[in-house]
Image (tube, helix red, strand yellow):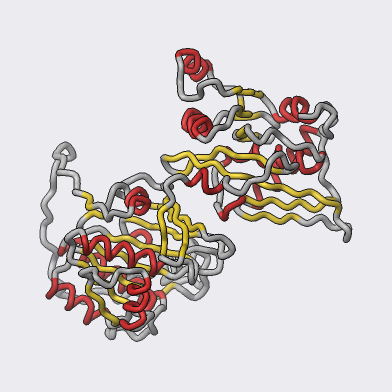
Amino acid sequence: MVAQPAFHCTACGAAHAKWAGRCDECGAWNAITEDDAPGPGVPRGRVIALSDLGALPELPPQVPSGVAELDRVLGGGLVAGSAVLLGGDPGIGKSTLLLQAAARFARGGLATIYVTGEESAAQVQMRASRLNLGASPLRLAAETSLRDILATIEAEAPDLVVIDSIQTMWLDSLDSAPGSVTQVRAAAHELTTLAKRKGTAVILVGHVTKDGSIAGPRTVEHMVDTVLYFEGDPGHQFRILRAVKNRFGPSGEIGVFEMTGRGLVEVKNPSSLFLSERARRTPGAVVFAGVEGTRAVLCEIQALVAAAPSGQARRSVVGWDGGRLAMILAVLDARAGLGFAGMDVYLNVAGGLRIGEPAADLAVALALVSAQSGVALDPECVIFGEIGLSGALRPVAQTEIRLKEARKLGFTGAILPVRPQRARRRDADGDDTGDMALREFADLPAVVTALFGPDGQGSNRV
């Protein structure tokens, strides 16, 4: 029986029974190609060994790098035979971070090779000298031929290989140019397969597209064990390393770095860093107690509301979801009677941090009302809570961690949704909130009335 030909999308790797002009999975046009069907006489595959579900193997050991923030994001350290994909905007510091980490691994006893396809070896050596890494036993190569790189890894058998970047690698057996979907997918497959077979950890650097996602097929993200994003605002010196996928640790964990003349420096307490320049009692400024991964991070949310001179209101958001802002404005209008029509609204998360959790809804809403009314909220009070379309406030997860971090930084109060009875019983038994004044509300109109008066314009000044 002749095998039926298979069709695959070169953009996302999805399989199709027949050719089509548009991929149903990712929407790419003219990306579906036919795979070569196996001819007659193809040998049958071998029988693979099966194991029981209850036979638990030993957990893979994790080797720490010595960079605490990187180890936190990796889940404790680097696992032998794992594949890590790191993406980020150009110039954000990906190469600097990996050069520092590779030097630390090499000093810790791991045989480490750094392969660069974007710079010459002399350029990397100059950066290493500027970062005081010249004495590290790190071996360096400037090469783009994947066949030669694989042969070197087979011969040297290193513990760690850094590839900077995967878009510059090419296989001479493929006709497409370096950086194309076919080349990137083939190079990632060869490197991850070699990593699993030889027990060599591989870190791949990936370019990102305009929308911030890693360039190339999404199948590369499925191949690797860990996907990291290096984020940051060019106008700030802070950098955020975020894990969006991790098979050996929690996803969503973040590490915070500061870009200096000596390279990237770890930030031990991100909350104090993001709040270091916050103003005292300013309308439109509130402090949000968020959670990133397993750590609580406090940051300032700033709002500005002004009359729109052109008649068409403008909405500008930095560090938060623009669609979420539109929803909060609609709830304030429909449930609290506060209209923002004909007014420009600007929202900013100070410090270059990007917030993705809905627990910031209440902090954003109160920052907007504060900016519109001109009434400043208590700067020693943190705010968090999710807002529903009905205006009701929904409790958020890890409330105790948020309050503990706020109390540690000297905050004396908190505004939050009504908590379940079991949480209140924990407070009565004594927890980490201490003597903080907790103000709990059931819905958004109740918060606005209590803080800004019945009309929301500051009749009851805070």
Q: What percent of the width, then of the height, locates residue 418?
A: 60, 23
Could you tell me which residue is drawn at 16 percent across and 36 percent down? 54
In the picture, measured across the screen, residue 310 lies left or right of residue 405, that is: right
Q: Is residue 1 visible?
A: no
Q: What percent of the width, then of the height, locates residue 352?
A: 57, 55
Does residue 128 lie above or below 408 as drawn? below
Q: What percent of the width, then of the height, locates residue 246?
A: 34, 51
Seen from the viewer's position, the closer of residues 150 and 319 is 319
Quarter location, residue 112: bottom left
Seen from the viewer's position, the closer of residues 217 and 378 is 378
Could you tell me which residue is drawn at 12 percent across and 75 percent down? 155
Viewport quadrant of the C terminus: top right
Quarter location, residue 52: top left
Could you tell me which residue is drawn at 76 percent across and 51 percent down? 345
Q: How many labels does the image show?
A: 0
Seen from the viewer's position, the closer of residues 352 and 163 is 352
Does residue 220 lie above or below 176 as drawn? above
Viewport quadrant of the N terminus: bottom left
In the picture, measured across the screen, residue 410 lies left or right of residue 218, that is: right
Seen from the viewer's position, the closer of residues 364 and 278 is 278
In the picture, measured across the screen, residue 421 lies left or right of residue 54, that is: right
Does residue 24 lie above or below 279 as drawn? below
Q: What percent of the width, then of the height, locates residue 136?
A: 24, 68
Q: Is residue 65 visible?
A: yes
Does residue 358 lie above or below 65 as drawn? above
